[in-house]
Image: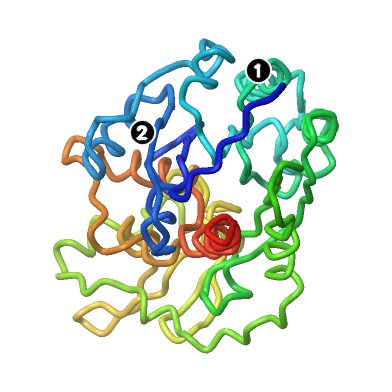
Amino acid sequence: LAIMRNERTPRILELFAGIGGFRLALQCSKVKYIPVGAYDIDETCNSTYVANFGGDIFRRRNICSLTWNELDQLQSDFWMLSPPCQPFMLSGNRRDVNDSRAEPFIHIIEVLTKMQSFPKYILLENVPGFINSVACTNLTETLEMKGYHSKVFILDPYDFGIPNHRKRAYLIAEHESVDDLVAVDACEQLSNCPKVVCSKPISDFLCTLEETELQKYLVPERLLIHKDCMDIVCRDDTSSNCFTKGYGRYVKGTGSILRCKMQDGTEKLRFFTPSEIQRLMGFPETFVFPENINIRQRYQLLGSSVNVFVVSKLIQAILNTFNRQ
């Protein structure tokens, strides 16, 4: 028989932990929790996570090397995971389960079939293309077989009043052993709520940059020939496009470019700074990158991260039901 726990403070496991977006969302949600494990293979993710949360629970580890017995021993109540999105991106090859980058996620599905001590809740974040993937079908079928009630839906931070689009698929699963099966429905209500008309301008999220610092972020002359491909926004605009891991290297489809005024009165185009993107993604001001992580790497890490604000809302909906048990 599967062993289900009845603790009042949920034990949290982060898989594909990245730079700690889920952990930040937990902190922002103001709920009590016990972190029991955080796993990711990437070294820059490792150093960034440890710089913000310490290294007590973080393990630089290939997810494919995790065994069901190891995960059983963690006795976690709540799994949070954001697997690599490249196999499911609409703009990519969409090789789905045939993509080698999907192997760690497929491994987790297989591990789940063997476990004896299931988490009460699972929260997964990925790109919208994940919804119609074979990987998603495999996961939902496995969850149903193991006694989970699950739903997948799309949320966008723009609909919560944040001037940035970042549509993502969220899968919420709740085990049948939970006394009051309301967490999935509570989360789904967030997608059905009336959309907030965004009134916050982008300027609320911008840094004050000295001219010398601003120069670092100006779009190079060689890229200005692609100006027609850019999504150019101004300080007073209330919308910006999703920032991806290719931001700073490519200008088409990787995120918005800001029109700014220079001291001499001329207008130029610049990239958003990593700190500005952090703010748009709900990261607190206390979040730091290690000094050896350069600007391009910061763009890559943020482009692969979750929106902290949106995930914190989902965590609140889930763990508020946990605490009522």
Q: Residue at x 21, y 40 (%)?
A: 51
Residue 74, position in %: x, y? 46, 25
**Comparing labels 1 and 2, the label whose residue is closer to the camera:** 1
Q: Residue 2 or 45: which is nearer the viewer?
A: 2
206 lies left or right of 156: left
22 lies left or right of 118: left
Rate crowding at label 1 as few (under 14), some (14 to 19) or many (20 or more) other CA atoms within 10 Å: some
* Number of numbered discs visible in the structure rendering: 2
Q: Residue at x 38, y 39 (%)?
A: 35
From where the camera sits, is residue 271 visible?
no
Name the element at disc 1.
helix
Query: Is residue 21 positioned above or below 92 on the image?
Result: below
Residue 8, position in %: x, y? 47, 50
User: Residue 315 is drawn in which quadrant?
Assistant: bottom right
Query: Is residue 224 positioned above or below 36 on the image?
Result: below
Query: Is residue 294 positioned above or below 218 on the image?
Result: above
Q: Residue at x 84, y 29 (%)?
A: 145
Tag on residue 45?
A: 2
User: Residue 286 is drawn in which quadrant?
Assistant: bottom left
Q: Are marks 1 and 2 in contact (CB under 8 Å)?
A: no
Q: Residue 225 or 82: which is nearer the viewer?
A: 82
Tag on residue 111?
A: 1
- What amino acid does circle 2 point to? Cys
Q: Residue 84 or 143: which is nearer the viewer?
A: 143
Rate crowding at label 2 as few (under 14), some (14 to 19) or many (20 or more) other CA atoms within 10 Å: many
Residue 284, position in %: x, y? 31, 63
Measured Cα–Cα span from mark 1 to mark 2: 24 Å
Tag on residue 317?
A: none
Residue 110, position in %: x, y? 71, 17
- What amino acid does circle 1 point to? Val
